[in-house]
Amino acid sequence: MNMDLNKLNLKEASEKLKNEKITSTEIIDDCLTQIGKKDNDINAYLTVLSDEAKKSAEESDMRRKSGRVASEIDGLPIAIKDVICTKSIKTTAGSKILENFIPPYDATVVSKLKDAGAIIIGKTNLDEFAMGSSTENSAFKITKNPWDISRVPGGSSGGSAAAVASEMCLAALGSDTGGSIRFPASLCGVVGLKPTYGAVSRYGLMAMASSLDQIGTFTKTVEDAEILFNIISGFDKQDSTSLNKELNKSKDPKNMVLGIPKEYFSEGLDPKVKEVIEKAIEKLKPKVKEVVEISLPNAQYALEVYYIIMFVEVSSNLARYDGVKYGYSTKEAKDLIEVYFKSRAEAFGAEAKRRIILGNYASSAGYIDQYYSRAQKVRTLVKKDFEDAFKKVDLILGPVSPTTAFKIGEKTDDPLTMYLSDIYTISINLAGIPAMSVPAGLSNNLPVGLQIIGPGLSENNIFSLGKTFEGARGELPSAPV
């Protein structure tokens, strides 16, 4: 009998498994049933691992019977963004150039999930190589927002956000280079965590912009985000940027001072979104020590800085896809040079080509000092803004997105307008600090996310405040799936 176990969050499902009220097999069956009902409309998944998930569920149930439970998430279904390597399972990065690529190894985060007994239920759709804010740039399909299928789910991790919001899994992993977890989390009404740079290993994440990329989580609650983060985080010697440091200890929200950046509430923020965020902040005021206005004066330059640095790193990282080593290779080439040119021309999408060209331009001999080197200097100023702010406040609050979910096709012909969607999220990646989107309310029946930003390694404080906010906010409706 279908019990709608796919509607549970990680904590609820874990408790029911512990109390032997349900089995992992039943949870997987309900999630697969929901995928069968809904994913033809939503297009969240590129690959659904039905047989593998059922087998893993049986193994989890056997472990539980014999008293060998691996962790709190043993037997629970988690989806993985298809830019994170999964051994013997196709990993495409949403690109034709890798449409048949099968990795010979698992990413560290996938290994950690498997060691914890979690079940990989499928690989989710994304903008090609995580390049986009709408999940319209995938080579394979356009993912739709579960709240309104005429609208985008956000990007680039739109498939993961939509899978969680439409209850086709209990949680998911994504990657965030300039907001690609927080933005779709906001637009789909789920919790999206972008951790401190280096707190979660990037080994096995197909690189887009290496100094900005970070793997993170999509969950239904802040508590679930904390559970999942604690499993996938930690030092990894296979990742040269991995941090071998402890997280900061949690602080009681009653003793926290929160900062509101005046730059985040100026022109460009939709008035109705602004209203939802301001109401959310009002609900938090009685729960904390103080809320003060702060300034991040270099935030106005973050967009330009981010796109210059990101374009250059993209052009470098995507140079490896040459039609020779692995991935797509043209059948039409007469010589090696044509293999390079034709393979890349045929297999990369328009957004990938745009970013490669702009990145090569910005890093070329005549322009690297004028653009890239200058952008790195301003990046330091953006980072210093946050450092100065966190001398006065514990956490910063603000919007995630300037608008709610926009219509599919609305911004595809205007890349600059699309890039502006990330205006409140990119500076966090430039600074390498953690941030989380928590559902704050609805505007015109579409979700709005509150962004909680902290200094490096302050995830525990972000979780603490996030849970306090959920309690003050009360229950919100789920996506009408």
Image (tube, rainbow, N blue to C red):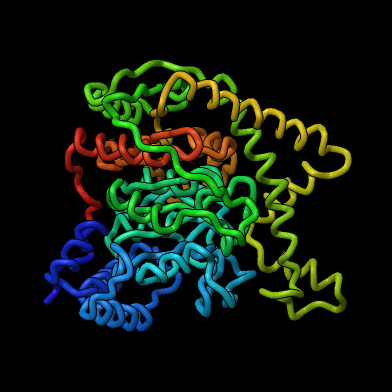
* Residue 361 placement, left or right of 46: right
Decide: is 148 above or below 23: above
Q: Residue at x 66, y 68 (%)?
A: 347
Q: Residue at x 53, y 71 (%)?
A: 106
Residues 168 and 86: in front is: 86
Q: Please state, as top left, top right, bottom left or bottom right, where the N terminus lies in the image.
A: bottom left
* Residue 60 placement, left or right of 331: left
* Residue 147 placement, left or right of 306: left
Q: Residue at x 56, y 23 (%)?
A: 385
Decide: is 251 above or below 96: above
Q: Residue at x 42, y 36 (%)?
A: 400
Image spot of residue 21 (x, y percent): 12, 70
Image spot of residue 344 (x, y percent): 72, 65
Quarter of the image holding residue 429?
Answer: top right
Image spot of residue 243 (x, y percent): 56, 48
Q: Please state, as top left, top right, bottom left or bottom right, where the C terminus lies in the image.
A: bottom left
Report if residue 481 is visible in the image: no
Image spot of residue 127 (x, y percent): 53, 57
